[in-house]
Image (cartoon, helix red, strand yellow):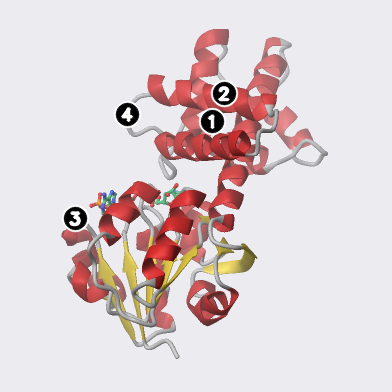
């Protein structure tokens, strides 16, 4: 029975995800590297801001950091409560999940790779998709905690499988973002009204998350509101391409998209949203998507 839950990493996603936990669990601990964010969370949502060493004494421990490297460095040397479950919601590297699951087993701790999808709005509304790799029994025990932050909680396989699904998901997002930029630039070059085109496509077979929300809300509006950093998307496409290489498969579209997103990340202004990747294409075509 889960008595206490902790959340480590109160960034754009974690801050919002952790806000749901006090509705379901009596003791909710939060920790963040910049500790004032943990204190602010405690004031706002009735959680308890604690030191990291105390946070890892909870029955269920969530983490949501930028990379697997950050999670491995954080866990190194920590004494975690025996019998607890660590749910890592970072979009991470499958190999790191397998390493951590093995390492934490020695402390009698289950590790689940449980990355999420649904953007900050999904974190805010607890409608995230949670894709989980790891031990099935641990998954079942951790289910109520994950259900507090998500809508679809799906076990997808052994350790690392959750991170793999997430990386491919985000690669598909990147492919779509880039191809919508090419398609809409072409339409603009032919004098078509982009809002009208968007209305048609969103009622047709070419629609996607990008055409339904990202393009109208961030690109055509020129807002590029920062909720999911371009460096994070570049990281995810890199993880996906490593998976392709490991499987020794040809993947021309995914390889090219990874290069395009890496280049866009290198040339973008600091702190850009992922949607700002289209600005690199605009600089080639001299067509502004608005
Ligand atoms: P943010 O950059 O907003 O937040 C990162 C968090 O990690 C902050 O709390 C930061 O602390 C902390 N952190 C960074 N480095 C370290 C470290 N070395 N040690 C300890 N804490 C650290 O990221 P997001 O919340 O956007 O993303 C988190 C994860 O979720 C990523 O893997 C991302 O790919 C994934 N994701 C993001 C989505 C989004 O829409 N934003 C959607 C789905 C998944 P501090 O405040 O001190 O800097």
Q: In what element is the residue under mark 2?
A: loop
In-image side of 235 versus 255 (left or right): left
Q: Position of residue 66 (x, y in %)?
A: 37, 48
**Circle number at residue 270:** 4
Distance from the alpha carbon under mark 3 to that under mark 4: 20 Å
Q: Position of residue 278 (x, y in %)?
A: 53, 24
Q: Residues within 10 Å of mark 3 (few under 14, many from 20)?
A: few
| Residue on which the image places disc 2 | 290
Cβ–Cβ below 8 Å for labels 2 and 1?
yes
Q: Earlier in the sequence, mark 3 or mark 4?
A: 3
* Mark 2 or 1, closer to the camera: 1
For the C terminus, the image quarter is top right
Q: Earlier in the sequence, mark 2 or mark 3?
A: 3
Q: Earlier in the sequence, mark 2 or mark 1?
A: 1
| Residue on which the image places disc 3 | 34
Based on the displayed image, in which of its 4 quarters is residue 32 positioned? bottom left
**Residue in the foreground of this view, choosing between 183 and 58:** 58
Distance from the alpha carbon under mark 3 to that under mark 1: 31 Å
């Amino acid at each position: 029975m889960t008595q206490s839950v902790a959340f480590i990493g109160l960034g754009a996603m974690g801050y919002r995800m952790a806000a749901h936990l006090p509705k379901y669990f009596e003791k909710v601990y939060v920790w963040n590297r910049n500790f004032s964010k943990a204190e602010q969370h405690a004031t706002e949502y009735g959680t308890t801001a604690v030191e990291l060493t105390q946070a890892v004494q909870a029955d269920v421990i969530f983490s949501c950091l930028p990379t697997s490297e950050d999670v491995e460095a954080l866990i190194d040397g920590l004494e975690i409560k025996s019998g607890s479950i660590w749910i890592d919601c970072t979009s991470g590297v499958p190999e790191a999940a397998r390493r951590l699951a093995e390492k934490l087993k020695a402390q009698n701790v289950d590790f689940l790779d449980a990355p999420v999808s649904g953007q900050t709005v999904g974190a805010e509304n607890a409608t995230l998709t949670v894709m989980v790799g790891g031990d099935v029994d641990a998954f079942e025990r951790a289910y109520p905690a994950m259900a507090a932050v998500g809508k679809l909680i799906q076990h997808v396989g052994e350790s690392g499988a959750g991170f793999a699904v997430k990386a491919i998901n985000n690669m598909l997002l990147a492919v779509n973002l880039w191809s919508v930029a090419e398609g809409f630039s072409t339409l603009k070059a032919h004098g078509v009204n982009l809002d009208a085109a968007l209305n048609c496509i969103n009622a047709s077979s070419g629609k996607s998350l990008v055409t339904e929300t990202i393009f109208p809300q961030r690109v055509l509006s020129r807002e590029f509101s920062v909720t999911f950093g371009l460096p994070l998307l570049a990281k995810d496409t890199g993880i996906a391409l490593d998976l392709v290489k490991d499987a020794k498969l040809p993947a021309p579209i995914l390889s090219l998209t990874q290069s395009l997103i890496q280049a866009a990340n290198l040339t973008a202004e600091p702190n850009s949203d992922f949607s700002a990747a289209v600005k690199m294409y605009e600089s080639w075509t001299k067509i502004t998507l608005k």
